[in-house]
Image (cartoon, rainbow, N blue to C red):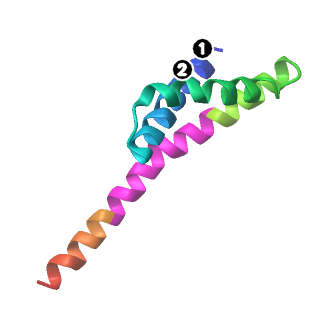
């Protein structure tokens, strides 16, 4: 349960911060605006087994988004950087 709480907390903050930067507004309305969305998502699991399935799914998605995606983007930037240097 603690794993799900920490993952949801990080994802909630990251989503609010991303939306605030995207729309160039304060983060506070987005933090409160995302709360009903989180509540509706939390109503999806019907029993404890579903809760743990959702927790595993969220953990895997967080691993991809915050672990593998930055590594992939770093590799792309290095490749593009080399290509750009050869054109000079």
Quadrant (top left/top right/bottom left/bottom right) for the N terminus: top right
Q: CA distance from mark 2 to mark 1?
A: 6 Å
Q: Are marks 2 and 1 in contact (CB under 8 Å)?
A: yes
Residue 57 in percent (x, y) is at 69, 36
Residue drawn at x 53%, y 22% as measured from the top left: 9
Is 68 included in the stretch rendered in magenta? Answer: yes
On screen, residue 52 versus residue 86, left or right, reads right
Instruction: Tell me the quarter of the picture where residue 80 sits.
Output: bottom left
Q: Is residue 76 above or below residue 37?
A: below
Is 66 included in the stretch rendered in magenta? Answer: yes
Q: Is residue 69 above or below residue 20?
A: below
Task: Tell me the chief SS of the magenta region.
Answer: helix
Nearer to me, 50 or 18:
18
On screen, residue 6 versus residue 83, left or right, reads right
Residue 11 in percent (x, y) is at 53, 31
Mark 1 residue crowding within 10 angstroms, few (<14) / some (14–19) / many (20+): few
Q: Which residue is mark 2?
A: 6
Residue 26 in percent (x, y) is at 39, 31
Seen from this angle, which residue lies furthest left?
88
Q: Tell me the tag on residue 41.
A: none
Residue drawn at x 48%, y 41% as measured from the top left: 19
Quadrant (top left/top right/bottom left/bottom right) for the C terminus: bottom left
On screen, residue 43 versus residue 71, left or right, reads right
Span shown in magenta:
59-76
Q: Tell me the tag on residue 2.
A: 1
Seen from this angle, which residue lies furthest bottom?
87
Q: How many marks?
A: 2
Seen from this angle, which residue lies furthest top?
2
Mark 2 residue crowding within 10 angstroms, few (<14) / some (14–19) / many (20+): few
């Amino acid at each position: 349960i603690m794993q799900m709480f920490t993952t949801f907390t990080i994802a909630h903050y990251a989503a609010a911060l991303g939306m605030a930067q995207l729309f160039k507004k304060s983060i506070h309305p987005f933090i409160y605006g995302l709360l009903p969305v989180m509540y509706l998502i939390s109503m999806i699991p019907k029993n404890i087994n579903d809760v743990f399935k959702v927790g595993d799914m969220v953990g895997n998605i967080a691993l991809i988004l915050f672990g593998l995606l930055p590594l992939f983007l770093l590799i792309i930037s290095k490749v593009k950087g080399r290509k750009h240097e050869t054109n000079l």
